[in-house]
Image (cartoon, grey):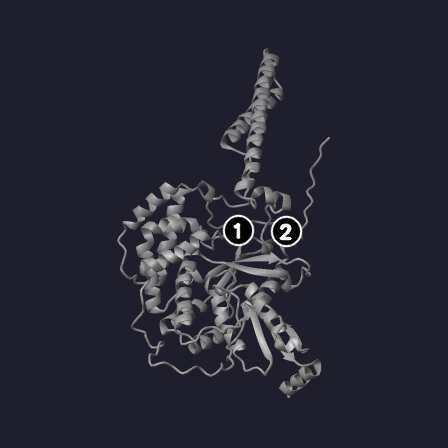
Amino acid sequence: MPFSHTYLKNPSAPVLQTPSGPRWALRHLDRELLLEASVVQAWVSSPDRPADINDEAEWFRETMSEICDVAMPRVPPGRARRQVYWWSCEIAALREACVAARHLYTRHRRLRIRPPDAEAREAELYEGYRAAKTALQLAIVQAKEVANAELLGSLDRDPWGRPYKMVRGKLRPWAPPLTQSLRPQLVEEVVSALFPSRGEHSPPPMALQPAVSTTDHTSDDDDVPEVTGVDLRVAVARLKAKNTAPGPDGLPGKAWVLALEALGPRLRGLLSACLERGQFPLRWKTGKLVLIRKPGRPADSPSAYRPIVLLDEVGKLFERVVAHRLVAHLGGIGPDLADHQFGFRKGRSTVDAIMRVRALTTGDAVSRGGVVLAVSLDIANAFNTLPWSCIREALRYHRVPTYLRRVVEAYLSDRSIIYPGHNGEWKRREMSCGVPQGSVLGPLLWNIGYDWVLRADLPSGVSVVCYADDTLVLAQGSDITELDAGEAASGS
């Protein structure tokens, strides 16, 4: 009786396609091959100063891609199939042999025209299949025993490693990016809310600038210190200590650390040219957006998602050079950041901020029977909405050298983010305000742009303690009536 298959299709069901992008299997990295390939590329004649900044940045991207192709395989597009912890090449070969033996046995059994020795041949193939299957099962059992022993032994070396993550359920299966799995309309709403379009903004006036010293540090256009070997080594050391996901170019930081042993001089030439010309390569200003779900919030609310922007590692190397010079200027020449800011500053932590609050709430006024009123300010989507004009004005106030201000201006302009859409294609959104969460310069620029808030003239008895964008305003008084009177006076 003839029959047909009926296929049911749900047009609303998402068809997820992992977007293409360069990725390398870092676990298969051959260090010697990478170093040798880097030396070969370094033989290419390099200009002391590149003619075009963007062309030189593109040369580094293409060259590093070729070096990575030599030293390790690429991860094929599509969903990455994660191997179990006990898997090995030997087991993979045994599995292939077992599958091949099973196919031979099943194909022989399905023969319609059977030769005279069919039964003997079938028994022979079956025994071959059983032997291959037994060998595979035995190898898996032995591999599991060895892997489990190593797993337990790793507790002494790394108590927060795989055993801990397995117990805490932190080894999650693969899942598509949220920008692919969510409804396209919701993704558009979330991205638009997290990265709003902002027109020109006039920053509020900052406090009066301290008296300028006899040396004007904003007029040193002709005196731009080049990037030295020490500058680059310090930046590379910070990169070496990190283990972050790569940016849109897919080039892992570990590959850069190794390759710059040979390519470092040429990269220093590029970074020095960027400082001299006040430019930031366009490719390094494109970030890959990753949305992270916040628990306990409605799924259709933009506030339920935390945006992280992944940037190219080589661009973050340059950011470290610029950030180091900005911090050195603020701390050595100044004016420095307000003392009330404890976030993103070396030598300061949340513990220091808490100790400051404790000192204010247990001082003499409180010990004599006074009261302290604390108000916490929550700035919604603070980092992504900071006006760039506030950063420019703050850089001028802090008398940052002109060449650094030009680089920061170039860093902020023409920024964009990309993310995989519902159909697997990359989507792009231009940025007109804010600093990237996931960058090196972003936190420092936030502190600089927000500094004017902490320098405001406050009424007597009022103090501010800040950690990044978390701002706590404290008011002291002999009793609650005095605080109410102070609030009424400030409001009038």
x and y percentages locating residue 492 in the rendered image: 64, 88
In the displayed structure image, the side of residue 321 where residue 265 appears, left or right: left
Q: Quadrant of the N terminus?
A: top right
Q: Is residue 464 above or below residue 323?
A: below
Q: Secondary structure at mark 1?
A: loop
How many numbered markers are drawn? 2
Q: Secondary structure at mark 2?
A: loop
x and y percentages locating residue 195 in the rendered image: 55, 66
Q: Is residue 213 above or below residue 345?
A: below
The disc labelled 1 sits on which kind of residue?
Answer: Pro
- Work out whether mark 1 precedes mark 2 in sequence or the reverse, and give the earlier one: 2
Q: Which mark is residue 208?
A: none
Identify the residue shown where x is 33% and y is 62%. Answer: 227
Near mark 1 (Cα within 10 A), the count class, few <14, some 14-19 or many ≥20, is some
In the displayed structure image, the side of residue 65 where residue 457 appears, left or right: right
Quarter location, residue 472: bottom right
Q: Which mark is residue 14?
A: 2
Spot the residue most to the right: 1
Identify the residue shown where x is 30% and y is 55%. Answer: 265
Pick the front one: 366 or 74: 366
The disc labelled 2 sits on which kind of residue?
Answer: Pro
Residue at numbered disc 1: 19
In the displayed structure image, the side of residue 280 where residue 452 appears, left or right: right
